[in-house]
Image (tube, rainbow, N blue to C red):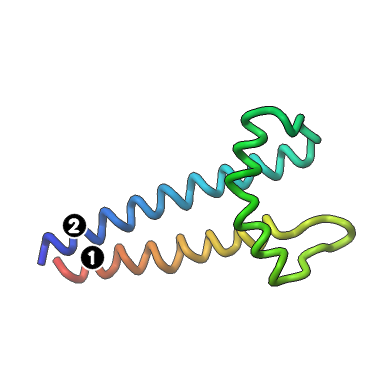
Amino acid sequence: MFILSNFLTAIAQVLDYVLWAYIWILFGRVVASWIDADPYNPIVRFLYNATEPVLARIRQRFPVYAGGYDLSPLIAWLAIMFLRWFVVRSLYDLAYALR
C-alpha cells in the first residue's frame, strides 16, 4: 500500500503547489486592477486570461459587488483556501493512513 500512499502524497503536493500559484496569480490580478495597469501588457493579459474564467463563473452565480467593488476575487480566494485546507490535507491524511 506504500505505492498508493506515495501516489496520494504526490497528488496532494502538486495540487497544493498549483493552488498556491493560483493564489499569487489572483493577487497579481487584483493589484493590476488597483493600479490600472496597461491592458496590452503581456503580464497583465496573462493575469486576466488566467483568472477571468474562474471570476466570471463566480460573478454569474453570485452578485458579488459591494460599493462598486468586485468581490469575486475574495470569493475565489476563500474557495482556494478551502480546497487547500480540506482537500489537500485530506489527501495527506489518507496517504499517511495507508502507510
- Hey, which residue is sitting farthest right in the picture? 67
Q: Residue 97: where, in percent of width, then height?
A: 20, 71
56 shown above or below 26: below
Q: How many marks?
A: 2
Residue at image mark 1: 95
| Quarter of the rendering occupied by the C terminus | bottom left
Say what amino acid the circle numbered 2 marks: Asn
34 shown above or below 80: above
Residue at image mark 2: 6
**Image check: 20 left or right of 5?**
right
Residue drawn at x 69%, y 28% is 41
Q: Residue 12: where, in percent of width, then height?
A: 33, 58
Q: Tell which of 21 and 56 is nearer to you.
A: 56
**Image check: 20 left or right of 40?**
left
Say what amino acid the circle numbered 1 marks: Ala
Q: Are marks 2 and 1 in contact (CB under 8 Å)?
A: yes
